[in-house]
Amino acid sequence: MDTRTRVAVSAALTLGLLAGCGDDADAPAGRTAGSPTPQATGEPWYDEEASASPSGTTGGTGSPCPVPVSFPLADGWTAKVVEPPKGELAELVGEALTKRGGTTVRCEVDGRKAGGGFLRIWAADAPAVAPRAALEGFATGTEETVSGQQFRDLRAGAFDATEITWLTTSSLTEETSRSWALAVQSAGQTLVFTVDEGLITERTDVLPAYRLAVQGLATAG
C-alpha cells in the first residue's frame, strides 16, 4: 500500500467514514488463566480502567450489529453497520478498511459524541478458526510494524475468551500506539472485538466501553 493509500486509510478509520446507520510466557505475573475478573494494573492491560455506564444493548439479527452475540453499549456510544466502501474511496483503498488478517468488519460502535473512539466487531472469514489464531492474524494483518503481542485467557460474559494486546508503530508518523482485542466463538463464528489508541484517542477514551461490551457478552436471542 503506497503512502497516499495509507493516509486515506488512516483518515477513514479516524473519522468513521464507513459507518452506515492462551496463556503466554509474556503475560503479567499474578494472573490466573481463565480468570473471570483478571486484575493486571498498568501496562499493558490497564484492568484498573473501570467499565463505562451502560445504555442499551445491541447484537443479533436485525440489529445494527448483526452478529450472534449481544453486548451492552456505553452511554453515548452508538452501534452502526459498516458498509463496504463505494465510489472513489472503494477504488482507492479496496478492502483495506473492511478486511484485516483473515477477518471482515461487521459493525462499529461510535463513541465520538461521548468523547471516545471506536469499538469494532469483526468476524473471522474461516468460522472454525480458534480465538487465539484469529487474534494473531488480526494483529499482524497490517503493513505497519507490530510488536509486543501478549495474550491471556479469561471469561467474557457468558463465553470463554482470549485477549491480546500489542503495539503498532506507524510508518507515517513513527508514533507507537497500543491496541486491545478479544475473541470468542458463538454459533459457529469467531468474533473479534477491537479498540485502539490513536492520534486523538487515549486508552481512557476506549477501554471503558470495550470492557463494558466484552464483560457483558451473551448469546443473542
Image: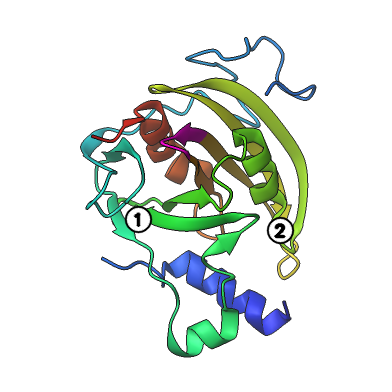
In the rendered image, which quarter is residue 144 located in? bottom right
Compared to residue 154, the image places residue 206 above or below, namely below
Q: Is residue 109 above or below residue 91?
A: above
Asked whether 34 or 60 is in front, the reply is 60
Name which residue lies at 39% across and 50% down. 116
Q: Position of residue 44 (x, y in %)?
A: 65, 32
Query: Could you tell me which secondary element the residue under label 2 belongs to?
Result: loop
Instruction: State which tag comes first along the sequence, 2 or 1.
Output: 1
Give the numbered dot on residue 110.
Answer: 1
Q: Residues within 10 Å of mark 2 (few under 14, many from 20)?
A: few
Start-end of magenta stretch: 184-188
Q: Position of residue 7 (x, y in %)?
A: 62, 77
Magenta: predominant secondary structure element? strand
Residue 14 belongs to magenta span: no
Query: To which residue does mark 2 refer?
Result: 175
Q: Quadrant of residue 6?
A: bottom right
**Which quadrant would the N terminus be assigned to in this image?**
bottom right
**Three-letter residue code for mark 1:** Asp
- Gap between marks 2 and 1 measured at Cα: 24 Å
